[in-house]
Image: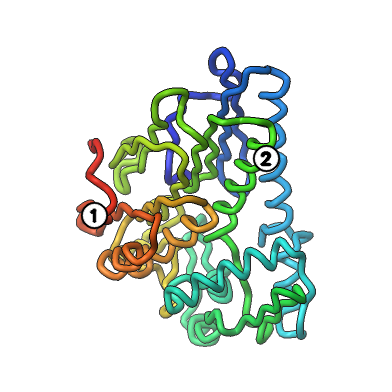
């Protein structure tokens, strides 16, 4: 999901002397790594290692890969406690934290019903599926024993999807890999989730938030350094209902099992993608007023929200940047 474009000026391979980069399709999106290194061998090795880490996480967390750990958990839903890896336990624990914080606005059990949406085919769950499975969307149907690394899904109808948190986590892990190579200036993006390490050698990285209704334009340009940013929007994975004309998109309101309404785009800035990713989804579901109120309660985070009328709203910590 290409929601946030990091305007790093690269097209793959070495962009200029001592800048190294590559882009690859992983996790259902375009993953882009760009970094500065004074050694060509180490610079290219760092890029390859970061991308390999994202590949590894895709194999672990994708609901579309039958051999992934996540798929195995969903297959055993309702069969008692499941022993999971420490890494998956950490991710589920973080997801449950945001579920509690938002009183259910963020909920990885949305997949219980969400798996029956097909945005490419323009299909949504039937009225019967909606009635039968809406009650399965509830984070309280998940019981996690973090210490024992055991997860229990209450019934076979309960399914989980980490699409609202996994990419942010993967971006963080890629940045950690780059740090291990001594990299101090880098950008990693995975669709709507990006993180910049340091600045761009004396000037900020320019990160663009895509215009929700003008595909080739940016709504906001942000000069950034040492920060993560995640964007959730209603304009990438969607279709229009042929009868009502309603926009059916992938960000579901857990309470209704239907596409959340009220905003077009939410971008959240903070220290790590592991937090900004779930927060952007959370704020999207909550809407402008409640979403900004949540962000204002969380030190170190800011948000940019574009509402259904195309108006842009900023949290208190942001001054309106250059927009077009």
Q: What colour-coding does the image apply?
A: rainbow
| Left or right of residue 32: residue 181 | right
Label 2 SS: helix
Q: Tag 1: Cα neighbours inside 10 Å, few (<14), some, or many (≥20)?
A: some
**Contact, mark 2 vs mark 1 (Cβ under 8 Å):** no
Query: Label 2 belongs to which residue?
Result: 177
- Separation of marks 2 and 1 at Cα, in angstroms: 35 Å
Query: Label 1 belongs to which residue?
Result: 313
Residue 311 higher or lower than 34, as above or below: below
* Residue 241 in view: no
Tally of numbered tags? 2
Q: Residue 110 in the image: x percent, y percent?
A: 53, 73
Query: Looking at the image, which is closer to me, 125 or 110?
Result: 110
Residue 6 higher or lower than 271, as above or below: above
Tell me which residue sits at (52%, 86%) in the image. 135
Q: Residue 225 in the image: x percent, y percent?
A: 43, 37
Tell me which residue sits at (65%, 30%) in the image. 182
Query: Looking at the image, which is closer to me, 265 or 123?
Result: 265
Label 1 SS: strand
- Extreme top residue here? 17
Tell me which residue sits at (64%, 37%) in the image. 179
């Amino acid at each position: 999901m290409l929601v946030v474009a990091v305007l790093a000026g690269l097209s793959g391979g070495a962009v200029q002397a001592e800048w190294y980069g590559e882009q690859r399709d992983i996790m259902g999106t375009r993953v882009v790594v760009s970094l500065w290194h004074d050694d060509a061998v180490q610079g290219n090795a760092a890029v390859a290692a970061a991308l390999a880490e994202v590949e590894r996480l895709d194999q672990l967390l994708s609901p579309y890969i039958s051999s992934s750990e996540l798929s195995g958990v969903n297959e055993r839903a309702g069969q008692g406690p499941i022993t999971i890896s420490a890494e998956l336990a950490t991710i589920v624990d973080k997801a449950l934290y945001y579920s509690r914080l938002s009183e259910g606005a963020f909920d990885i059990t949305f997949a219980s019903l969400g798996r029956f949406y097909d945005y490419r085919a323009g299909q949504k769950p039937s009225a019967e599926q909606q009635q039968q499975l809406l009650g399965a969307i509830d984070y309280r149907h998940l019981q996690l024993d973090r210490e024992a690394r055991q997860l229990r899904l209450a019934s076979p109808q309960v399914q989980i999807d980490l699409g609202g948190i996994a990419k942010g986590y993967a971006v963080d892990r890629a940045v950690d890999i780059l740090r291990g190579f001594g990299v101090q200036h880098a950008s990693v993006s995975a669709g709507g989730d990006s993180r910049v390490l340091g600045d761009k050698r004396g000037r900020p990285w320019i990160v663009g938030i895509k215009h929700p209704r003008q595909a080739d334009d940016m709504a906001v340009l942000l000069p950034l350094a040492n920060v993560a940013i995640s964007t959730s929007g209603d304009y990438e994975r969607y279709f229009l209902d042929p009868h009502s004309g309603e926009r059916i998109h992938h960000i579901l309101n857990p309470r209704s099992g239907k596409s959340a309404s009220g905003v077009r785009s939410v971008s959240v800035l903070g220290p790590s993608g592991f937090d900004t990713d779930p927060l952007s989804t959370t704020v999207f579901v909550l809407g402008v007023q409640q979403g900004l109120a949540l962000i204002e309660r969380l030190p170190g985070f800011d948000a940019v929200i574009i509402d259904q009328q195309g108006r842009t709203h900023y949290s208190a910590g942001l001054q309106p940047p250059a927009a077009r």
